[in-house]
Image (tube, rainbow, N blue to C red):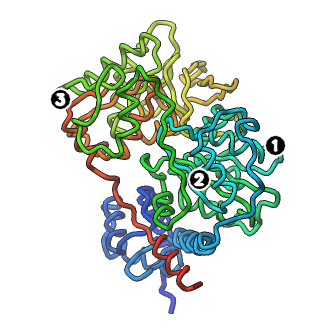
Amino acid sequence: MRQNFNYKHRARGAYILTELEDALKNGDAFFASEADAIRICQRKYKNVSLSKLKADFDYLLENGDLVFEGSRLYLHKVQRYEDFVASELASILPHNVVPTHPMVDLDVSAGVRLNELQKEAIQMARSHHLSLILGGAGSGKTTLIQALCLEYFVDGKLVLAAPTGKAARNLTERTGLPARTVHSALGKIPDEDFLDPVKWATIRMVVIDEASMLSLELFAGLLSKLPANCGLVLVGDTNQLGSVGTGNLIPELLELGCPVTRLEQQYRQSDKEAALFYNVANFPKLCDSEELKFDESFKLIPTNEGDIFKVIQEEAAKRHLAGENVQVIAPTRDDVKRLNEQLQQVVNPPAEGKAEVTHNGITIRENDRTMILKNNREERCFNGDIGAAHVEPMEGGSAFIHIPLSANRHPKFYSAKIGSTLTLAYALTVHKSQGSQYDTVIMPASTDCQKMLRRNLFYTAISRAKKQVILVGCKEALHIAMVTPPEPRKSMLVIKTHQKMHFAA
């Protein structure tokens, strides 16, 4: 018999679902137990008793929003996506070869020089339903994408996309080919059902760049749209951060035996930047800070823990004032906020006649380095875009803020959007920096910054630099980062796929 749940359960249930969805942004597909999920909500709703929270969870279970698999507690939609992806992979991987036509002369058709491994990667992509192309920063992935996509682009049979708007824009600028977000390619918006019974009719090749950021739901959407004899190629770097959201797809696909080409050769850094070149290429497999190389391209400024952020501020301000393309990367949002405020006061202080506006405790001043936090198709701007602010004051203390961007884009925002859509960008978190490149990256190497001392976080941060990395702190922190693996993500995808394969056999 259905329990008599009142409106309070329904109201709190909606908030609980939001909290649980936020909690799964760490990549987990489920909670190990109902008790784990309730504890998360207890930290948020301190004034709600345990018995009331338990009743709210009972309501969500009764309503089908939450489901159990054994002791594991899923959001229903996440379970649905995981089951769907497992079924699709169980169908694809044992019969992964698709018809292909003879290899073309890629050096001629693409107008670029390819090494033999890149040519092998393209041939694998053209002959498989699902394949991976993996390589570190500067390993030639962009060149390979250009060559792979050209013949399909000309024939109108290509989907070229990336998980985020910034990554899609960067992909377009690097390849000269029109790239979209995966959301846009699927014709979906956040919170919409990503499973679509309507297949792409004419598409024969789908290429997804920055695939390490691909969430489970986006991957499910791609598989649901994929027609027969169409190739899906995931291009990425397994050593970078995973998705912000449920999923750990590339490591799981590797475990399932998905065909993969690994690009080893490095192209990005020049010979004179030997230490940066060596460290970025080898960081994921080094085990001790003594194995790192140091020179002007990759240097450590030894600093007492208490002075680290002061030194970072000084080093960054010096380079900003010299007009250099420099980015501070910090461990936490609080660190980012503090550094942004400090750097703003040094690099772009208030002055008579210089327009500024304040909202949500954040001041944006004329010429401030400013980041856009949300995609806006009408304004052709994306989460992660950065530009120098132009502040247009209005009566009543408000203002319009213009952010000139590349490709002749000039999005305009009302000052009430500061904090939610706009923020200062002298300093960024690692997640916000992913997918971008800067001449110089400055970051802490601090034993107090435990959140940053994981191999994938540190690697992602240093690989943002094209010319120079400046670390402030100590070698001990570097060692900790090098030997500390990413936090494991809870997932049943591999097990479910194996089970479905066994059942089908």
Lower sequence index among marks 1 and 3: 1
Residue 306: mark in rendering: 3
Residue nearer the viewer, 127 or 170: 127
- Check the image and report above or below for 224 versus 394: below
Q: How many marks?
A: 3
| Residue 11 position within the rendered picture, expressed as x and y whole percent measured from the top left | 49, 67
Mark 3 against mark 2, which lies toward the viewer? Answer: 2
Which kind of residue does numbered mark 2 sit on?
Answer: Leu
Q: Mark 1 and mark 3: span between their CA atoms?
A: 57 Å
Residue 301 appears in the figure: yes
Give the class, few, some or many, for how many residues have Cα within 10 Å of label 3's Cα (few <14, many ≥20).
Answer: few
**Element carrying mark 3:** helix
Which kind of residue does numbered mark 3 sit on?
Answer: Gly
Quadrant of the snapshot with the C terminus = bottom right
What residue appears at the point 41 percent right and 40 percent down from the top-left corner? Answer: 460
Disc 2 designates what residue? 234
Which kind of residue does numbered mark 1 sit on?
Answer: Val
What residue appears at the point 51 percent right and 38 percent down from the top-left corner? Answer: 139
- Check the image and report above or below for 143 versus 99: above
Lower sequence index among marks 3 and 2: 2
Lower sequence index among marks 2 and 1: 1
| Residue 412 position within the rendered picture, expressed as x and y whole percent measured from the top left | 64, 28
- Residue 224 falls in which quadrant of the image? bottom right
Disc 1 designates what residue? 154
- Residue 251 falls in which quadrant of the image? bottom left
Residue nearer the viewer, 109 or 352: 109
| Residue 368 position within the rendered picture, expressed as x and y whole percent measured from the top left | 49, 20
Q: Mark 3 and mark 2: span between their CA atoms?
A: 43 Å
| Residue 423 position within the rendered picture, expressed as x and y whole percent measured from the top left | 48, 32
Residue 340: mark in rendering: none
